[in-house]
Image (cartoon, rainbow, N blue to C red):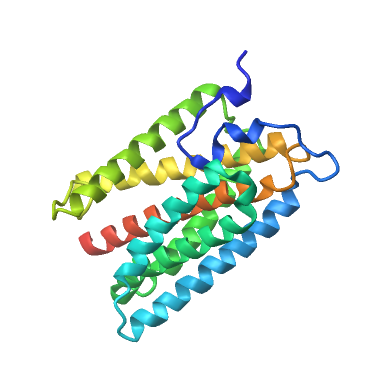
Amino acid sequence: MQKLSNYKTSNPAFSNYFWENSPDTSKTMSVRGIIVKSMVCILIISIITAFVWKLYDNGTNVRWFTIGGMLAAIVISIVISVRQHWANFLVPLYAVAKGCFLGGFSAFIKAKFPELPFQAIGVTIVTFFTILVLYQTRIIIVTKKLRSVIVTAAFSIMIVYLISFVLSLFGIKTFIWGTSWVAIVFNIIAAIVATFTLLLDFDYIEKHKNKADKYKEWIATWGLLVSLVWLYTEILRLMRTFAIKF
């Protein structure tokens, strides 16, 4: 049987360094610590998002908040991947970057559909706890095969998004945008995959609570933020598409 550390994942918050080094048993990762850190980071994202919304309402062009936040989040994620001990201050910075991205991204949608961002938040919260219950009751079990499917699907979607972003710099609009049925199907698939990445987060936390080093609470928090922000973004996009199309 393969060791858990041999598994790979496209989510940078689940790379092999989780299992390297022996943890300090006097200070280990706890679920309470992850919850507190996650709530703090979500609060940061919420405050920054509200601030960007206010700027947009006052006539400020927030397009660069969206692009800058997205690029900053990618750079910060890469640094966290190779410098895990810096996570205690990099993860809050990641939250700031994501707040800028979500603020700019959702401001445009909020301008035409004021209720959609809040509805998307509600759907995201319900989805989170639904997946948590399904995992805790073992209705869904994270097997090697399921993990492989989730990782492969997530990686493939990220590649499509990356290619689409590069092409957009040259004025080329790909099939994943717009209100076509192809775009809708892709959006639905992406939302489903984003939802299932939460299973990997829960599985990691359960298997390493009270074992991994204390600072890795920040890494686990980062993994949850990656999944939640992605899920919220896909849900908001899908709701906007339906609002326009129907």
Residue 52 screen position, x and y as percent: 41, 75
Residue 6 screen position, x and y as percent: 57, 22
Task: Give me the residue at 33% from left, 73% from top.
Answer: 62
- 47 horizontally vs 59: left or right: right
The answer to which image quadrant residue 213 occupies is top right
The answer to which image quadrant residue 60 occupies is bottom left
- Evaluate whether residue 199 shows in this view: no
The residue sitting at the left extreme is 171
Task: Give me the residue at 45% from left, 36% from top.
Answer: 10
Residue 86 sits above or below residue 22 on the image: below
Comparing 116 with 88, the one in front is: 88
- 95 horizontally vs 217: left or right: left
The residue sitting at the bottom extreme is 58
Comparing 136 with 208, the one in front is: 208
Comparing 102 with 20, the one in front is: 20
- 225 horizontally vs 246: left or right: right
